[in-house]
Amino acid sequence: MDFIFTEEQQRVIDLCKELAEDFRTRAPEHDRDRSAPEENYEILRQNGLYGISIPAEYGGLGIGFQGYAAAIVELAKGCASTANSFNMHANACGSIMQQPLISESMKKKVADLAINQGKLFSASISEPSSSSLVITSMVPKLKAERVDGGYKLYGKKAFCSMVESSDYVFLYANPQDDSNPQASLAMLVPVDKGNVAGVHIEDVWDTHGMRATRSNTVKYDGAFVPDELILHRTEDFLNDFIINSANWTISSFASVYLGVGIGIMEYASELVSSKKPKGSGQAQGYHPDSRRRIGEMASDLHAAYWSNIHAAWYSDKHGSSIQTFHNLMRAKHTIASAVSNAAHSATIVCGAHGMFKNLHLDRMVRDAATAPIMPPTIDACADQVGLLTMGLDPADVAPPLKEEKPLVESQAR
């Protein structure tokens, strides 16, 4: 195993670390106003990062998933909302590039849109009825109706981060005439920042944390998708997208939260190592409780970081497999636990000085609150890791996919 970063990977990691310092200066404002960090997306574009998840053969940065996982950690330390929403762009491009069902010509088209034309993508999978505890609920209910020259979409997607800032949305829809719940069409929906007919953004995102991701609900009411933007069709959505693209659908988000956790630890370390209580000749960091709290955070997050890098390295080296999925789920569980513990310990060790809204810790702790519930939840991860560790097949315990039956008149009453 070789975890040494290439020269290009390290360049991108260092660039994201530098940009994070700038993003951090505006993070409180965007968090307070739950406003989209549009200027940050533009800076990412100007620095060539729209190609961050695109292989070199398509004109992208070619840093692999391992390089991306380390880079997005650095970005999240500055502004978690920017990192988490921009991760949707990387998620979309990365998933498309590694999907064998998508043609080479389409991959080149997507790369051109992102890199040369500077188009921003959002990935949109969740729906109002989705539950990360029930994996079969992730299959799309958004309907695609066949019309001349393409499809019209009807239904809703939820938690659509950055959609109002995006040019295209990468999503899956169920063909209206197909009775198989897993039958899905992958497509790019032109949304032009919400200014397209049949695309209605419902402003519901007034939340505890990750406020500037603006992960609103989108209603599609006849939005048209031309045939040339249909990417591929699958009859097995859960396997083709959720499992085989688990690096982007699962681990990329985990990497964002890992950055939040490390940011929390670094903030708490700086505070207690520089704060000198009245009457004491030493900084508060010398107190045994402070040492223990920081030590636990550092140990947990160090383990989480290298678990994540190993999973990303394995994904790059071996591609999609059950073992790759196992590694990614294990890393996500480790990260969710470490970040939650770090947020808890930091609020204690920093005391009242960490509670003020004008300080960064309050925002980071609120952003960290979603680490254990970002799909798949910490419980769902543990469940899958347990099954795979015992050599059992997760499909054997998944609830069957069944068509919902309409309520009869007596039930409706």
Image (spheres, rainbow, N blue to C red):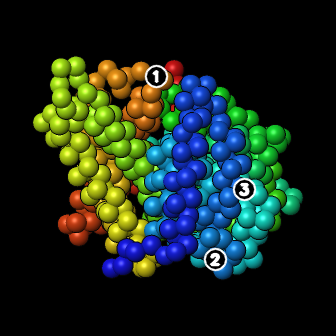
Q: Tell me: residue 395, above or below residue 300.
A: below
Give, as a three-letter code, the residue at label 3.
Gln
Q: Picture coordinates of residue 100 (x, y %)?
A: 59, 76
Residue found 31% across the figure and 20% down from its top: 352
Give, as a three-letter code, the residue at label 1.
Lys
Residue found 66% across the figure and 71% down from its top: 60
Q: Picture coordinates of residue 234 (x, y %)?
A: 59, 67
Give, as a three-letter code, the residue at label 2.
Ala
Which residue lies under the disc numbered 2? 56
Which residue lies under the disc numbered 1? 357
Residue in front for this viewpoint, 365 or 202: 365
Residue found 65% across the figure and 36% down from its top: 36
Residue found 23% across the figure and 52% down from its top: 299
Give the farthest residue toward the front.
281
Q: Earlier in the sequence, mark 2 or mark 1?
A: 2
Instruction: Kindly state the secondary structure of the residue where label 3 is placed.
Output: helix
Instruction: Kindly state the secondary structure of the residue where label 2 is placed.
Output: helix
Mark 2 against mark 3, which lies toward the viewer? Answer: 3
Instruction: Kindly state the secondary structure of the residue where label 1 is placed.
Output: loop
Q: CA distance from mark 2 to mark 1?
A: 42 Å
Residue in front for this viewpoint, 63 or 393: 63
Q: Tell me: residue 32, above or below residue 387.
A: above
Residue in front for this viewpoint, 270 or 186: 270
Which residue lies under the disc numbered 3? 46
Q: Quadrant of residue 157?
A: top right
Q: Earlier in the sequence, mark 2 or mark 3?
A: 3
Q: Earlier in the sequence, mark 3 or mark 1?
A: 3
Q: Picture coordinates of residue 4 (x, y %)?
A: 40, 74
Mark 2, Cα crowd under 10 Å, few <14 / some 14-19 / many 20+, is few
The quarter of the image holding the N terminus is bottom left
- Horizontally, residue 80 falls left or right of residue 162, namely left
Mark 3, Cα crowd under 10 Å, few <14 / some 14-19 / many 20+, is few
